[in-house]
Image (tube, rainbow, N blue to C red):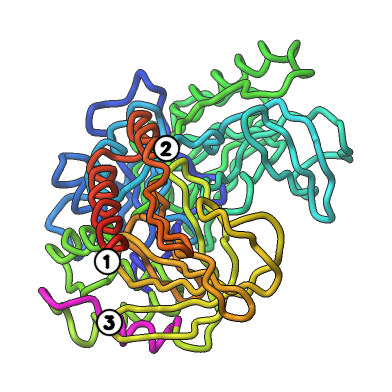
Amino acid sequence: MSDDETATGDDSDFDTATGDDSDSEATPSVRVRGIYTTAVTHQLLEAGHAVVQASEPIRERFDAEFGDGTHEVTVATTTDRQGVGLHGNADGVAAVDAELRTVARDTFGWTDPTPPGAVFDARVTETLGSGAICDLGDAEGFLPYGDVDGYVDEGDAVRVQVRESAPPWVDHRAQLGTDVRADGGLGALVRGRDGVTVDTRDDAAGRELAGMTDFLSVEVPDGWGIEWSHAATRADMDALGDALSRAVDRADDLAAALDAGEAHESETGVCAAPTAGRWLWFGRESRFALDEARRAVAPTMPGHHRTKAASESASAGVDLAEALCGSSEGSEFPFAVVTRQFGPVEGDSVDIVHGKPDGRAFSLGRGEVTEWDADGTVAVTRTLSGGGTYDALGTPREAGDTALTKFREGRWWYPTVYRSADGAAKGTYVNVCTPVECFPDEIRYVDLHVDVVKRPDGTVERVDDDELDAAADAGAVPEAVAKKARSVATSLERALSE
């Protein structure tokens, strides 16, 4: 398996970057994992960042020094492969975010309200079969029953720490636990534990590391145990000492913050935030820009990241194709080949995932692919339920109506034609969005607010310019993207009026 194939590549369940804000530098050390690893590593090295704990494939591809020391920022691919999470000290995250936001104009970014390591005073709002939903103040989290001591019920106050966060466009919550951990990059201190443990499958290396820990001149505070990651088995004594010192400093800060917050347990909200986080979503243009960065150091097929983002099987197919055939620089993305192999094709069922500039995403419904063409066209037909009217069209929505939506891979817009059960036209709604991507199980894009509609009487109207303007002014939509959206809307309005 190549390094780029791994979704996150974490060495432990809880591995955030380290270092207080005061310790960060203009170019922090970064640990990178996931399908974007080679491209991101290339961009960060070009910008002067130090990349550490690199895998063997990465070490072979680059003429660069990769240390095994601790990291200040982690860049990890999201589990759905649509983007990356940046987590670490605030200054380091800001520096890496500023660099990666320049990948292409359709790279969107949002602050993570629940970065790993943050501690919240929470309240249980609902109990489910496997765990409890917790109100964190400005967000929600999920606390598995296996990660809590005792019994929790609706209305209970509980102090929790974020184990794993979640990007805003997915439909699951941050994962929580009640143990408090102070991460140091190569290892962590765990409150309420004793001794030394090593999270590795290499028993011999683990025993050696546990024995070496006794020789580190770092005093661990009472009531905290040491847990090393697998990466620590490859580190030297200086790196281990630095990591443990960072963890001790983090533990002291956490203990002080938590002790100070004991009087406020009746309130919900963050009581300690040792790390910061950002989520970056890569649009289609961004994925192709990352292809170019990767191609500078390794054979890269056209649409490498676009294909890998589709599914795990597609990701494995890319690795095989590149291993056998190398790079095909300058060629077009092989839409027909990729979709014939992995989908979607005629007869398949897909979700229409409607992303918003604030990071949220929701399904417009699932439909059948009723047309497929090698030029990138995927037409989806849905049968609708009744109730209300169609946005901006003003025509009634009735049971049995159909919606025929024609997507074309890479296009900045798509039309939906609404018809009654007997085939009468109810209007056309054209969404302006970031370039469409047709993945095996879903069609994805980010809606850019401004749209153009054509009513049954032939009237054409451009709508929601004010929402696009407001989003651009607020920084939710990059100005280059807003400019493109306005231009597309103008062309559509002209074409529909002819």
The structure residue drawn at horizontal position 63% and vertical position 47%, both measured from the top left corner, is: 173
The structure residue drawn at horizontal position 44% and vertical position 28%, both measured from the top left corner, is: 246
Query: Which SS class for mark 1?
Result: helix
- Marks 3 and 1 sit apart, C-alpha to C-alpha, by 35 Å
Q: Mark 3 and 1 residues: CB-CB less than 8 Å, in contact?
A: no
Rendered position, 346 above or below 41: below
Can residue 207 be seen from the camera position used here?
A: no
Look at mark 1 in the image and give the residue it sits on: 57
Q: Which mark is residue 375?
A: 3
- Marks 2 and 3 sit apart, C-alpha to C-alpha, by 32 Å
Q: Earlier in the sequence, mark 3 or mark 1?
A: 1
Q: Residue 204 location, x and y as percent?
A: 50, 60
The three-letter amino acid code for the residue at tag 1 is Pro
Between 482 and 87, the one nearer to me in the picture:
482
Magenta stretch: give its range. 329-344
- Which mark is nearer the camera, 3 or 1? 3
